[in-house]
Image (cartoon, rainbow, N blue to C red):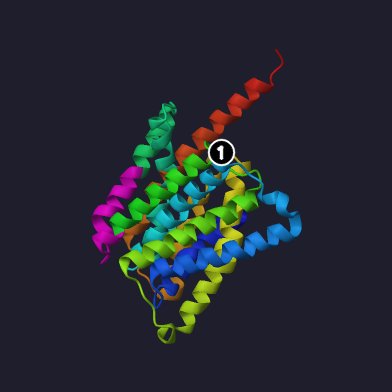
Amino acid sequence: MAIVYVVWGSTYLGIRITIETIPPLLSGAIRFTTAALVLAGVVFLLRGPRAFRMTRKEFGGAVLVGLLLLNGGNGMVAVAEQHISSGLAALLVASVPLWLVVFRILAKDRPQLLTLAGVLVGFGGVAVLSLTGGGGSSDSAGIVIILLASLSWSLGSFLSARIPMPANPFTTSAIEMVAGGLGLALTSRVVGESVDLTAVSGRSWAGLVYLILVGSLVGFTAYAWLLGNAPISLVSTYAYVNPVVAVVLGALVLSEPVTSSMVGAGLVIVLGVALVVSTERRKKAQIEEKESAPV
């Protein structure tokens, strides 16, 4: 959780620096394909071929989740950061736990009243940020794209706990990154992205290396492991910390503006997420207590 808390907050800055001179979808394709090959090689050396034994349904599940999380989610975040600040992007992505509740409702789960109240509060903050652009010069197209990215990431996270997935979480992470990386490469080609390697700055190369080694190999693998080994309500708490880390780093490194609208609406979003997660955690604790009580 500590890795996901801090590392992922810093990746918004890493993406912003990388896409200064490398197209967003292409940079994501390089990032996740490279990280996937490295991770798969390490897993093979440590666990052998048995780590890659899985059914077709499990392989298909990992591919689907990888496309939703990385091709749809992360890819659109990179595209959106061409139009909005990294801090604003992180604040809007903080709505992911709220979308997870929406998907639960669609799946005919009945959240508690406080959970629904948290969703309404959080989406109120999202609405303010979306309508005001954070009080800055943000492009409305970037805001729409980042909201779609949040939706795609939420759906991938929701499905990951409900469809067959490979038993080894590191194998799962490698497959998801391969699928996401290839999906981004195809999407990049379709939209006509191109890059002149001689024009790529040292800053962008450094940002890409950071995203590969720290953001993907360390951060995403930790997230994939958590999805299979921890309650989704606990995993979702990264949304408390990531925006703060992203906003602070964006302001310090890139001198991105931090407006009163961003601070106020951001606090409302985090408050809504906190209400959702704390309510769900109490509910889970009560259920576990009842199940462990002697009959």
Report the residue at 54% width, 29% height from top.
283
Q: Is residue 195 left or right of residue 234?
A: left
Instruction: Write down the residue under mark 1.
Output: 164
Nearer to the camera, 227 or 64: 64
The image position of residue 84, as x and y in percent, is 32, 65
Q: Is residue 110 above or below residue 54?
A: above
Quadrant containing the C terminus in the rendered view = top right
The image position of residue 53, as x and y in percent, is 66, 46
The image position of residue 106, as x and y in percent, is 38, 31
Q: Is residue 209 above or below residue 202?
A: above
Does the magenta segment cover residue 125? Answer: yes
Identify the amino acid type marked 1: Pro
Q: Which residues are magenta?
A: 123-142
Q: Is residue 106 above or below residue 180?
A: above
Tell which residue pokes out farthest to the top in this image.
295
Q: Main secondary structure of the magenta part?
A: helix
Report the residue at 63% width, 65% height from top.
38
Tell which residue pokes out farthest to the front in this image.
56
Nearer to the camera, 113 or 202: 202
Q: Is residue 191 visible?
A: yes
